[in-house]
Image (tube, grey):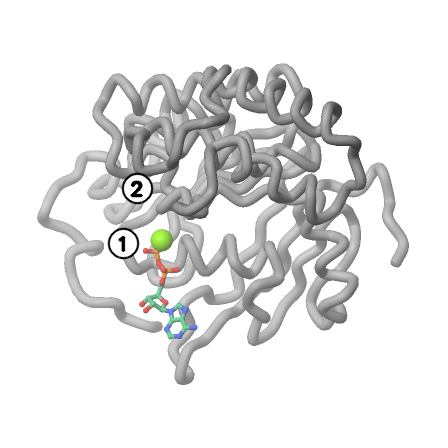
Amino acid sequence: MSMTSTAPPIQIEQLTYAVDGRPILDSVGLTVQQGEIFAVMGRSGTGKTTLLRLIMGLARPTSGQIRVNGVDITGLPERDLDELRKDMGMVFQSAALFDSLTVGENVAFPLVEHRRLPESDLAERVSDLLEMVDMAGTEPLMPAQLSGGMRKRVAVARALALEPHIILYDEPTAGLDPISATASDELIRRLRDTTGVTSVIVSHDVQSLRRVSDRAAVLHNGRFLVVGPMAEFAASQDPAVVQFLSGSPEGPMSGPYQPD
Ligand SMILES: Nc1ncnc2c1ncn2[C@@H]1O[C@H](COP(=O)(O)OP(=O)(O)O)[C@@H](O)[C@H]1O
Ligand SMILES: [Mg+2]
């Protein structure tokens, strides 16, 4: 496996993912630059989570290419994928914490799996990770004792445990109150600013993505309608983009999925 340090962290070309012959993603292309916060937005069921699963190698494309750190992951054996996945932290929509483990044990989990650290170093690393997400000192708590926003922060700390160069967030603000959502946006930006991590967010939270993303794409009927800084989206004449940004119930996004 060769890795080119100059290659963009994520490069997707003509990616198609079809379920029962129906293209969820239809020949999409995307390059995410080093240290960028890139957002993919779209309505529920448009294929946002599927895109993240494809980038993680948890799903295989029907056709097309996905390069992570310059390595084409399509067709890569599971063993090599495992190795590459250590460089990608995933924050699942549900946070996906282990309910029977403490917060500290949750964050330690990838370190115990993949690194041999003395107990004291492990504890220190976990403490640092929790501090990074403003959850210092919460090691002994159980996930059930935390609010939704706190659970997501713990999930972020766990995703950062192996110091990945890429982090993928699935609907980071879903289910959060507006203040927690703003705090989540600030955290995502701060982590990028302090660690240089390349971040991909999938979400339908337009307000949040305006604050947090450097560039964004609108996913509709398997395609990206626009790609660029969200400030430029207002100029788009595409009725679907206009509808999505305004949240109007009337428009091309309202109908059922229509493959073309
Ligand atoms: N492995 C799969 N089997 C069947 N349907 C799938 C599979 N993966 C994704 N889908 C379908 O793809 C569509 C997009 O799903 P998803 O990526 O979860 O959308 P989003 O995250 O944007 O809400 C949905 O209609 C979903 O049912
Ligand atoms: Mg989803």
Q: Is mark 2 within 8 Å of ligand 1?
A: yes
Q: Residue at x 87, y 45 (%)?
A: 4
Residue type at the position of mark 1: Ser
Tell me the quarter of the picture where residue 24 sits. Answer: bottom left
Percent position (x, y) of residue 111? 69, 39
- Quadrant location, the C terminus: bottom left
The residue pinned by badge 2 equals 204
Say few, some or many: other residues with alpha carbon within 10 Å of mark 2 (under 14 / 14 to 19 / 20 or more): many
Q: Secondary structure at mark 1?
A: loop
Q: Is mark 1 within 8 Å of ligand 1?
A: yes
Q: Earlier in the sequence, mark 1 or mark 2?
A: 1
Q: Nearer the viewer, residue 193 or 158?
A: 158
Residue beneath the point at 33% across and 28% down: 149
Image position of 236 with respect to 196: above or below? below
**Which label sits on residue 135?**
none
Q: Residues within 10 Å of mark 1 (few under 14, many from 20)?
A: few
User: In the drawing, does residue 252 fall left or right of residue 60?
Assistant: left
Which quadrant: the N terminus? bottom right
Q: Is residue 110 above or below residue 56?
A: above
Q: Would residue 81 be seen by someone viewing this image from the given angle?
A: yes
Q: Which residue is mark 1?
A: 44
Q: Secondary structure at mark 2?
A: loop
Residue type at tag 2: His
Mark 1 vs 2: CB contact within 8 A: yes
Identify the residue shown where x is 47% and y is 42%: 101
**Nearest the camera: 183 or 127?**
127
The picture places residue 103, in percent across and down from the top left corner, at 47, 33
Residue 227 shows up from this direction: no
Q: Quadrant of residue 138?
A: top left
Say which residue appears at 65% left-offset and 25% top-offset. Answer: 123
CA separation, marks 1 and 2? 7 Å
Residue 28 on image: x %, y %: 52, 58
